[in-house]
Image (cartoon, rainbow, N blue to C red):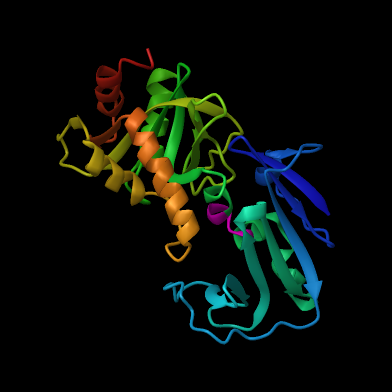
């Protein structure tokens, strides 16, 4: 199997000696015949050595543990929490590739493309391509991208829905939006296969106008303020998808955030989920009319 996907302006290639079921959500991003920016190669082997070093992931609720082996950082895939090991993943940022060595009995773990995407670690891959993944809903308001970021349940997709209903904005993504600077230097936000419960995932991009950090407030509390650099950095950083054990990825994404907030305003937004959430942003940005 050889599959290519166009995500966030980058070409991700997956090469494996097995076939996996397709996903309508992910295949929307499919392409072919391109030079890949990053390649994931699956290699079947007969035996995997148990890791001899501690798990440094600090995530004990995950099916992936992380270990230092012979000056390499290795991700170990487990069947369930602390279950049997069935694969190891080796990230090679210098050559823009990841090698995943797996046991044949583990193929059931890769039967669906969505499962396979979960295992390969999209956040690690795209960090190496100077792209951050932001917990944010993305709308296209008259050719300008507005992101509503925040934790699950804060109302990101609700704000996007309000803009669609009251301002005719297109909802591009509902949960995890990819952001980077394109080859011409323009900051772009991109739809991704990760929609969360919103169901919004469109393979489109739009120049970024502003980022809204959505906060809860009182029933009639309405405010919007532009954040200073330090606070803007903290707000964006706490809403990215990133593994702290991956020093390379942390440095790469930190650099992306610093560059982004020099160019793009970040706001704190408090507003009930009604038309005022649209009017308040419109007044501040002068957009979406």
Residue 95 percent coordinates (x, y): 67, 53
* Relative to 92, residue 28 above or below: above
Can residue 158 be seen in the rendering of this structure? no
Q: How many marks?
A: 0
Residue that appears at 57% across and 28% down: 183
Left or right of 240 in this view: 226: left
Residue 79 percent coordinates (x, y): 62, 77
Residue that appears at 54% across and 82% down: 82
What type of secondary structure mainly makes up the magenta span? helix
Q: Does the magenta stretch include residue 248?
A: no
Residue 168 figure quarter: top left
Residue that appears at 49% across and 25% down: 186
Left or right of 99 in this view: 149: left
* Relative to 90, residue 127 above or below: above
Left or right of 183 in this view: 239: left
Can residue 193 be seen in the rendering of this structure? yes
Residue 203 percent coordinates (x, y): 61, 33
Residue 101 percent coordinates (x, y): 73, 71
Residue 83 figure quarter: bottom right
Along the line of sight, the residue nearer the viewer: 66 or 210: 66
Q: In which quarter of the image is the C terminus?
A: top left
Along the line of sight, the residue nearer the viewer: 256 or 4: 256
Residue that appears at 77% across and 78% down: 105
Q: Which residue lies furthest to the top in this view?
A: 289
Q: What are the residue bounds of the magenta stretch?
A: 120-124
Q: In which quarter of the image is the N terminus?
A: bottom right
Q: Is residue 123 magenta?
A: yes
């Amino acid at each position: 199997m050889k599959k290519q996907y166009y995500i966030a302006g980058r070409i991700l290639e997956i090469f494996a000696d097995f076939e996996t079921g397709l996903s309508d959500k992910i295949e929307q991003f499919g392409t072919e015949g391109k030079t890949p920016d990053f390649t994931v190669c699956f290699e079947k082997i007969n035996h995997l050595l148990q890791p001899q070093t501690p798990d440094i992931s600090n995530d004990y609720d995950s099916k992936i543990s992380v270990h230092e082996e012979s000056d390499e950082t290795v991700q170990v895939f487990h069947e369930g929490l602390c279950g049997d090991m069935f694969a190891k993943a080796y990230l090679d940022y210098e050559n823009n590739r990841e090698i995943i060595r797996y046991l044949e009995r583990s193929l059931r773990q890769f039967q669906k493309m969505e499962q396979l995407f979960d295992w390969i670690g999209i956040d690690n891959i795209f960090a190496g391509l100077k792209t951050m993944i932001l917990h944010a809903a993305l709308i296209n308001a008259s050719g300008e991208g507005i992101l509503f970021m925040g934790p699950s349940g804060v109302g990101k997709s609700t704000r996007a829905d309000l803009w669609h209903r009251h301002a005719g904005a297109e909802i591009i993504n509902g949960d995890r939006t990819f952001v980077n600077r394109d080859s011409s230097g323009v900051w772009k936000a991109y739809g991704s296969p990760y929609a969360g419960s919103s169901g919004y995932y469109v393979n489109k991009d739009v120049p970024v106008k502003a980022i809204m950090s959505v906060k809860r407030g009182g029933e009639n509390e309405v405010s919007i303020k532009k954040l200073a650099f330090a606070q803007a950095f903290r707000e964006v950083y706490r809403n990215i998808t990133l593994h702290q054990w991956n020093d390379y990825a942390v440095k790469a994404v930190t650099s992306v955030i610093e560059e982004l907030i020099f160019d793009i305003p970040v706001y704190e937004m408090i507003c009930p989920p009604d038309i005022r959430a649209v009017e308040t942003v419109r007044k501040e940005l002068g957009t979406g009319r």
